[in-house]
Amino acid sequence: MDLLNVIGKKLAEFIDVADAWIWDWPLMVLIFATGILLTVRSGLVQVIRMPRALRYMFQNEQDGEGEVTSFGALCTALSATIGTGNIVGVATAICLGGPGALFWMWLAAFFGMATKYAEGLLAIKYRTIEPDGHVLGGPFYYIERGMGKNWRWLAKIFAFFGASAGLLGIGTVTQINGVAGAVETLFDPNKANIAFSIGDINYTWATVLTAIIVSFLVALVIIGGIKRIAKVAEIVVPFMAAFYIIVCVVILICNASKVPEAFALIFSSAFTGTAAIGGFSGAVLKEAISRGVGRGIFSNEAGLGSAPIAAAAASTNSCVRQGLVSMTGVFIDTIIICTMTGLTIIISGAWFQEGLKGVAVTSYAFAQGMSFAPFIGQLCVTLSLMFFAFTTILGWDYYAERCVEYLTNGNMAIVKIYRYFWILAVLVGPFLALNTVWTLADALNGLMAFPNLVALVALSGVVAAESKHFFSRWHE
């Protein structure tokens, strides 16, 4: 057991170093530069075309080709993006980088909308549709077909990192870890009912039962493929998003006098740097930017290249139209939902409470925000996190399976084996170290982003040409 502890510690240290290197300034600059470039080349699409995008979000095309409706594709993408990053990720960013991290999340989301627009556009333009209606598209196809077959190696790298990120990080372990933590905090906060122990860590029956139940439900859905995932997402995603937003609005109304002060703190600390630990310093300012951008991308996935895999399955004949629909996902995910979480954490003072981390920060914030019924506040966080994480596991399974399908040249037997490993990862996820899991997820996200961002820059001219052609025919 001592040997395992040493190995685990060394592995965690290696992951920390790798994550710090991946998410250093070069990637930050590349993400923002790509977003700025696409904002310019698309004609400030996230501002000028947002009303049209919101209309298209609810208007499905009747004669488009694809596997699911345009709204179903958006809900599938949202099911993957609206996850623990909106609850746990925002809390982690603010605790480590201070309230200013939320400002950098907003900035990343603003340019991220143009990035997501380009991803959705290119996904439709370069997708493939088999005679049986099966659709495959995403970064690996717009790299190979848009940049040329000489770049297929870059597409393979993206697919490898995508499959790895889903299985080992963002798609499974972080999600179920967050759910299990929330359930335990709600029903057994003192860890009175221990099921078993690993080293010095005790695991409760609440954690064990959560892992078993969620794994079973995930298996029921993902075996049905994209159509079943989309059907579940179309029902669950709008409901869960509306529920969470309503609860947050209630909390903000109850604490309305603190909201202006919270916004003032967000903007002031965004450029000076302040955190619960570390006071004011340049290092903390860098942490605010790093955590804000990193968690923002973890949450809305703009630039990662994951969402266009779902967008490619949409029933549409217009790549620009689907790009507009895809763009709304960032607005809903970060500008609305992450902001709600962040404001709640800031006005409650949860971000500088000692001993709190992860979902416990948000649970504390909701309990304080609903001081008239603190248990109801915690229950709302738990229910929201369960829905958010469950749908993220489903959406990311689709992404990762398409990556495996591309890597193996369509070998569906290997895809099915991968699917069972996915279910296994959900089952064991709650028993892995939270900090290491989040760091690994961050690192793998960054590795996914590199090849996708290269492709977006290389194909920005295609985005500009398609946009110009479409909007010249359709005037507001």
Image (cartoon, grey):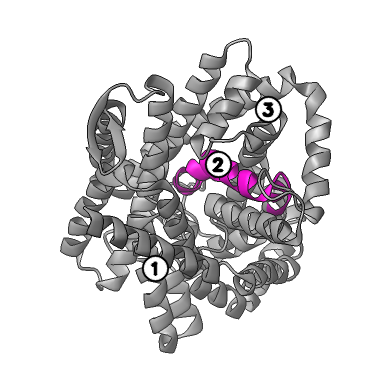
Depth check, front residue: 70 or 91: 91
What x and y, as percent, mark residue 420? 20, 51
* Cα gap from disc 3 to disc 2, whole angstroms: 17 Å
Depth check, front residue: 353 or 181: 353
On the rendered structure, is 268 left or right of 90? right
On the rendered structure, is 25 left or right of 124? right
Circles 3 and 2: CB distance less than 8 Å? no
Give the extent of the magenta segment. Answer: 76-104
- List the residue tagged with mark 1: 161
Vertically, is 424 above or below 411?
A: above
Depth check, front residue: 170 or 142: 170
User: Counting residues from the N terminus, which is met first, the one under dot 2 or under dot 1?
Assistant: 2
The reply to whether residue 133 is in sight is: no
User: Counting residues from the N terminus, which is met first, the one under dot 3 or under dot 1?
Assistant: 1
| Label 3 Cα neighbours within 10 Å, binned few <14 / some 14-19 / many ≥20 | many
- List the residue tagged with mark 3: 348
| Label 2 Cα neighbours within 10 Å, binned few <14 / some 14-19 / many ≥20 | many
Mark 1: amino acid: Phe
Q: Indicate the secondary structure of the residue bearing disc 2.
A: helix
Residue at (38%, 27%) from the top-left corner? 184
Residue at (54%, 76%) from the top-left corner? 455
